[in-house]
Structures are given as structure tokens and as C-alpha cells.
Image (tube, rainbow, N blue to C red):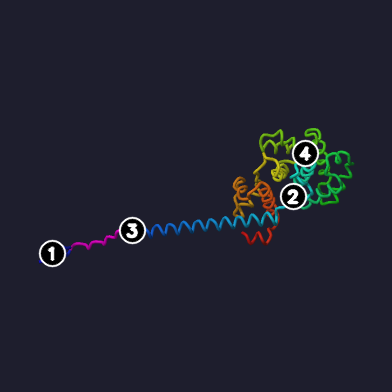
Amino acid sequence: MHGPGPGLGDAPRAPVFCAGRGYREHLRTQSSIDALASIESRMEDIMARKELIEALIEDHGTLYSEEIGANISRDVPQQWFHWLLCALLLSARISADKAIQAAQALKEDGLHKAEAIRDVDRQHLVAVLNRNGYARYDNQGADYIRAAAEMVETDCSDDLRRIRDSAETRDDILDALTAFKGIGKTGATIFAREAQIAWDALYPMLDGASAEQAAKMGLPDDAEDLADAAGSRERFTRLVAALTRVSLDQPSDRVREAL
């Protein structure tokens, strides 16, 4: 006589496995491996981002203000006025290289100072612009420059820092800058993009073109996040300048390799 067991019509029972101690240890080990892999991947991304930022700053991080000979980091009136003139020239529908050339020529001719511009003959100012890449807008540019020299005297006592000191927000500064004839929103943004190296109310500032370029290169397109990645105010300002330059021209081989 057969003992208890499945009958002919009964389905065989599925084996039962118990998750014992060894299996739980296996799960914990696998979880640790996955977590470690995730950390390593994140660290690789951070190092790659750091390498890219370093390449951008070193190869393309020269400020436009530096290129024309204006040391705005000194935070003195004369340097700010020269940078304002460059922002004005860059606002025209002309290549950045030609605008920079014109701003450099103004300094070489002693016409980067508001007082000198107020005293110079208009036709001489037109001639300087005409000879230095600004022929298309030489007359208009000369009038805008002369108007800026007059306005900085009447409204700011020849000291653009008064705009900063009387402003409460970044938008206040931008609005005040657009009051200069020929600057407009574009010129105000150009000026502020580098002025943030010394003016607290502007930092951190990332304009549309540089934010778009940052996103294309896999960098944060948020000003606060990108400033954190850059590591300091000066490095951030230079990084923004680099992104602007790369958006207008080709990146260096080192930057391409870091992408």
C-alpha cells in the first residue's frame, strides 16, 4: 500500500527556496558593487567636467575688456568707461574682432577717456574708427561715443560705479546702462557679463548665448550651478567669456578633446 503522496492527477509541487544568509550577503555585495560603480561613474563625469572647464578658461578665457587694455578688476572709473565704449562698439552689427580693434585704437589714440573724447574734434574721432575696422558705422559710432562721454559726466560725475552704488538689483544696473545711446540691451548685457568680476549685484550672470553654449558642451546652463563648477568669481567670469568666444568661433583642440 502506497503512503501519502500525490495522486496521478495532482500537479507536482514547486520546490521552495529559502533566502538564507548567504543569499542576503550576495544581495548586499551586489548592491555595494552597483553603488561603487555609480560613484566611480559620477567621479569620472566630475573629472571630465573639471578638465573641460580648465581647458575653456586657459584657452579661451581672456576677457574682452583685457583684450582692449581695460583692467576692470581694478574697479576704477577710467577702466570702466573704456569698457563701456567697447560694449557700445560691440553692440553694432559688426564682427567682434572689428569692434575690439576699434576699441583698442581708441586707447592708442588717447580716446578711451571721457574728458579726452569731450575735447576732441568729432571728425578726428570718426577717422580713428574708420581706419580701425569700424568704417561702416564710423559716424554713428562717433556720435554714440561722444554722447556717452557727455552722459557719464552729467549723470555719473565721470564715475560709472555710481550706477552700481545706486542700484539694488542686477536689472537696475542693466536698465541704467541702456540709457546710454547706442548701448541697448545687448550692450548692457555685454558690459555686465564682465563687470560681474567686480560688481556684486551682477554675479553670477550667464547670458543667453553663453548658457546655450554651456548646454551644448554638457555643462550646467544655470548661473549658480556653473559658478559652483567654476570654483571662483574670476574663474566663472572667464568661463563665461570663454563660452561666448567658442560660440562665435571654433574651440581649441584641447577643448575638443575634453568634450
Q: Which residues are magenta?
A: 9-22
Q: Nearer the viewer, residue 133 or 81?
A: 81
Q: Which mark is residue 3?
A: 1
Mark 2 or mark 3: which comes first in sequence?
3
Mark 3 or mark 4: which comes first in sequence?
3
Image quadrant in which you'd find residue 110: top right
Residue assigned mark 3: 21
Image quadrant in which you'd find residue 122: top right
What secondary structure is found at the residue carrying circle 1? loop
Q: Position of residue 6 (x, y in %)?
A: 17, 63
Residue assigned mark 4: 181
Q: Residues within 10 Å of mark 4 (few under 14, many from 20)?
A: some
Residue at 29%, 60% in the rendered image? 17
Q: Position of residue 226 (x, y in %)?
A: 61, 49
Q: What's under tag 2, amino acid-wise?
A: Tyr
Residue farthest bottom in this picture:
1
Q: What's under tag 3, amino acid-wise?
A: Arg
Q: Nearer the viewer, residue 186 or 238?
A: 238
What secondary structure is found at the residue carrying circle 3? helix
Quadrant where the N terminus sits is bottom left
Q: What's under tag 1, amino acid-wise?
A: Gly
Residue assigned mark 2: 64
Mark 1 or mark 2: which comes first in sequence?
1
